[in-house]
Amino acid sequence: MRTVYALFVGIDDYPGAPLRGCVNDVRAAETWLRGRTGPEPRVRTLYDARATRAAVLAGLEEHLGRSGPGDTALLWFSGHGSQSPTSDPGEATGWSQALVCHDSLVPGGQPVLRDTELGALLDGIAARGTHVVAVLDCCHSGGATREYADGAAVRGVPWQSWWHTGSREGGGPGPERGRHVLLAACRPQELAHERVIDGRTRGMFSHALLSALDGLGPTTTYGEAHALAHARVRVSGHIQHPELRGPEDGGFLSGEPVPASPFLLRHTAWGWEVNCGAAHGLRSAGAEFTLSGAAGERTVVVREVRTESALVDPVDWQPTAEDEQVAHAVTPSALAFPPAVVTLSGEPVAVRLVAEAVAAVPALALEPDGPPGPEGALRLHVEAGYGRARVSGGAGYPVPDLPLRSPADAAGVTDCLAHIARWHHIRDLANPDPLLSSLVRITVEETSVGGLSHSADGEVVCAYTPDGREPQVRVGIHNFSGRQLWAVLLDLTDGYASSPHLFEGEFIGDGRVGWARRGQPVWLRLPPGRSTVRGASARDWLKVIVAEDELNLAPFRLPAWSSAAPSGARLSPAPAGGGGLLRLIGAGAKDGRDAGGPAYGDGRDAGGPACGAARWGTAQVVVRTQV
């Protein structure tokens, strides 16, 4: 059975800078934890003067460090934090963050607990197989001082993504290290606030998160808990955006994947909101989402598209007060993605079998003959006959022939076609407004391992060494926009996979560089199954998406295509008419596309950019790894 080791740190009695709600926060968190079903948690608490730097380190190393494979280690910190300028190239914002222990504010006292130091400790525990969670209620992505202003106090919040690592196809040299999950009160440049709630001073984030957990129950995911906590904190009117860094579809305190939709519907101060926006391909009002698993038809229609989210209205159903207290998994039922045009050739019976399957998939448009498809649409071809189907036309590596002897096999062919179409939607995503796109650049820099050159068509060519070693490069995201931007770097492989693992969503300061894998080398290699013979090659499309606000990452995650584990990209029924909208599932359908698991949401707030949808942009380079 999973044992939870918990370290609760709450500090109000700071010398010269007292706070009021931190001890209340961690006591409430401890009560919540002890009220859960399962084995009794093993808890250590550090309040006020007992929460010295040495005691916090001992709690991390000796108490949480006792956890083993299959256990959970929880750090809940509520108190002051700090930030300071740094020239460390691994810090993309130009600031280093820290937690402030009780004795860190005493004249001549102990140093603060730096983000890199804390991150190394947490990841060291996670590397042993423990699921590690840090809940930090403080300011400035690592902790920052909070002061009283207008009757409210502000805290600090370290959320820097300490756990960034690499994996296959553009990743590191081996398996990924253990990574901890982070739930934080606000963004790195913001303050976290506390106020009186029901007669007691509480941190708004801690109170919102615990309230969300109480309402969601024991099977909730990190994405659901964050979405509700975020909405409740934003209602306060303070400029404070809680953050999640970790598996959106992971079960809370377990990390085990929970099958669900990649999108969530929640109620906010601005009405109902879905965490899918223009940067994900949502083009205009009128798009639809359907509540997953709902009894009967329950859909919402988009009335305003923002960069990272959309405001929606219920269609023919009235949400209850209970509906407003939970996050609903939703599946897009109409998106602004044009269907891929499919042409068929081959043996008539086999062609007819594929044609019938294609006709039922809204992501695909059959064009056996007649006028061409929409301008700019992806064009795929299927050659069918003699028990096999060959799919071609995509930009990736050739797909192996697929079996074609039955309607079920034909469904597998259309799943492959729809998967390729989705991959192209991500690769070709671009904002018609080119402003930010022109102010962001990706660079691929040579290291001492492997050679680097540029082809006539603009590809970056990275060569194996003569003795067969895989090339290594450094990949940087350069921000020349005059403002701080959030960025994610997608690795789109020629195996039709898309992953943000190289730079999984961070803010980059103006004039600074965000480095993939925090400046560590990116290893490039041919994927498993391809012979590393002379002249063999593989391609990666490195695509950065930048925005003035965070984006939902789930739609950008796509596994490599495999006939052994199809992605379930077939959707029904037919496309909606007008406006370029694509209907993805039927009303009330119980199964739909799963683009990589549920995701956290992040709505636009009244203190954001003045325009209706904040600016966003993209940049892209093609890397060819060659033997």
Image (cartoon, rainbow, N blue to C red):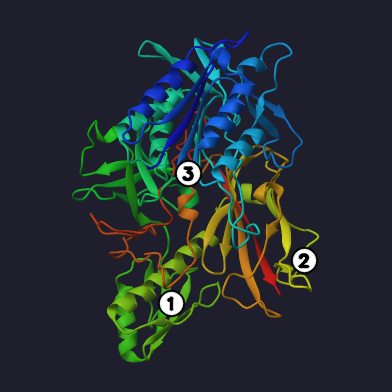
Of circles 3 and 1, which is in front?
3
Label 1 or label 2, whichever comes before in sequence order: 1
**Which residue corresponds to mark 1?**
372
Name the amino acid type tagged 1. Answer: Pro
Locate residue 593, reporting x and y percent.
36, 59
Q: Is residue 490 above or below residue 188?
A: below
Secondary structure state at the residue bearing disc 1: loop
Tag 2 or tag 3, which sits nearer the N-term? Answer: 3
Query: Do residues under tags 3 and 2 come within 8 Å of each other at their CB atoms?
Result: no
In percent of width and height, residue 608 lies at: 52, 32
Residue 414 visible in image: yes
Q: Quadrant of the C terminus?
A: bottom right
- The residue to which callout 2 is attached is 450
Mark 3 in CB contact with mark 1 (< 8 angstroms): no
Give the label, 3 or 2, closer to the camera.
Answer: 2
Amino acid type indicated by mark 2: Gly
Q: Is residue 435 visible?
A: no
Residue at the far left: name it.
296
User: What's the distance in space between the residues labelled 3 and 2, CA to CA?
Assistant: 38 Å
Mark 1 nearby-residue class (10 Å; few <14, some 14–19, many ≥20)? few
